[in-house]
DNA sequence: GCGACAG
DNA sequence: ATCTTGTCGC
């Protein structure tokens, strides 16, 4: 459900109605017109109760996908809710247009949750994007709630060198802008790349993602969504024990 | 023209 | 992303 009913241009009203065009050029111009709407707002990790992680897995022939969203307690990291959607890919993978492939099934899946997460952690980029409107921004704009992008590799820019210790970070710079941070979630392991999706800030996002990654490189909510989507794709019979 | 390119 | 288990090393 969209957010506040602000001054909206005709173009943006149109975007509300058709947020996922199937034409690549139309998709790019939509990103350009929406990038300025990303809100950077301070997020206090300690006030976050529920965090959702999202991921999508594809069948080898790319004829089927499974979108998964898992909600964990920020404090205990226990799974409190989850939902999945099986669908057919409607948009090809094109670097920079990832949202048009993954956001539709993810939005549908979030709609199936019975809980309402305070923050959504997306597997991909937020503002660290050629037009500053990656998947996490698109999700945040569509949901009207805080989102954070957490990518395993870079789409744009370069990260300043960072120390080997867990918790160290450095600026992620693209075209002269600080668009995110490289964050070391495990000592001696490649960093992950954090960027603001919507209604978040880099300082709060960095702390939150670090708190959510006590043991592995990838934060728990995204790991849980990754595992769940793979299980469903494989057609695992026994799913008992899951909340 | 060439290389890079979230998942 | 996906095809895929064990294995080497800290």
Image: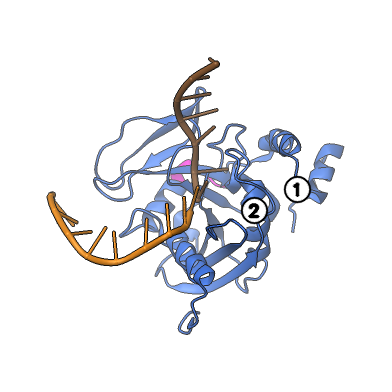
Chain colours: A blue, B brown, C orange
Q: Earlier in the sequence, mark 2 or mark 1?
A: 1
Q: From the image, tell me which residue sits under label 1.
A: A19
Residue at point 74%, 48% (across, down)? A20
Chain letter of the residue carrying label 2: A
The magenta stretch spans residue A228:
no
The answer to whether residue A212 is seen in the rendering is yes
Most foreground residue, A82 or A169: A82
Instruction: Pick the residue in front: A147 or A201.
Output: A147
Q: What percent of the width, then of the height, locates residue A3?
A: 73, 53
Q: Residue at x 45, y 83 (%)?
A: A241
Q: CA distance from mark 2 to mark 1?
A: 10 Å
In the image: residue C8, left or right of residue A94: left
Q: Quadrant of residue A97?
A: top right
Q: Are marks 2 and 1 in contact (CB under 8 Å)?
A: yes
Residue farthest to the right, as pictured: A10
Q: Position of residue A175 (x, y in %)?
A: 52, 23
Do circles 2 and 1 both sit on a common chain?
A: yes
Q: Which residue is identified by label 2?
A: A103
Number of the label disc, if any, that sits on residue A54: none
x then y, percent, for residue A6: 79, 44
Q: How many marks?
A: 2
Tell me: residue A134, above or below residue C5.
Answer: above
A216, A77: nearer the viewer: A216
User: Can I make out residue A198 in this image?
Assistant: no
Q: Nearer the viewer, residue A134 or A41?
A: A134
Identify the residue at image location x=29%, y=50%.
A186
Q: Tell whether A28 sits left or right of A157.
A: right
Residue range in magenta is A200-204
- Label 2 neighbour load within 10 Å: few <14, some 14-19, many 20+: many
In this rendering, the answer to whether A131 lies above or below A80 is: above
């Amino acid at each position: 459900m969209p957010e506040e009913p602000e001054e909206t241009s005709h173009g943006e009203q149109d975007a509300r109605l058709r947020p996922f065009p199937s034409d690549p050029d139309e998709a790019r111009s939509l990103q350009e017109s929406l990038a300025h709407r990303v809100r950077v707002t301070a997020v206090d990790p300690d006030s976050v109760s529920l965090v959702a992680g999202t991921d999508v897995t594809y069948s080898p022939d790319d004829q089927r996908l499974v979108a998964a969203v898992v909600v964990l307690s920020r404090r205990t990291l226990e799974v409190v809710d989850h939902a999945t959607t099986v669908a057919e890919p409607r948009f090809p993978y094109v670097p920079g247009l990832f949202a048009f492939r993954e956001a539709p099934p993810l939005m549908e899946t979030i709609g199936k949750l019975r809980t309402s997460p305070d923050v959504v952690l997306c597997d991909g980029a937020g503002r660290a994007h050629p037009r500053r409107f990656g998947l996490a921004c698109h999700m945040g704009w569509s949901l009207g709630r805080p989102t954070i992008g957490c990518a395993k590799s870079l789409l744009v820019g370069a990260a300043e060198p960072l120390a080997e210790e867990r918790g160290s970070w450095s600026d992620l710079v693209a075209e002269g802008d600080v668009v995110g941070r490289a964050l070391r979630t495990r000592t001696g392991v490649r960093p992950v790349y954090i960027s603001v999706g919507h209604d978040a800030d880099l300082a709060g996002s960095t702390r939150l993602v670090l708190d959510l990654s006590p043991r592995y490189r990838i934060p728990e909510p995204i790991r849980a969504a990754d595992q769940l989507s793979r299980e469903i794709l494989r057609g695992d019979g026994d799913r008992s024990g899951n909340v």
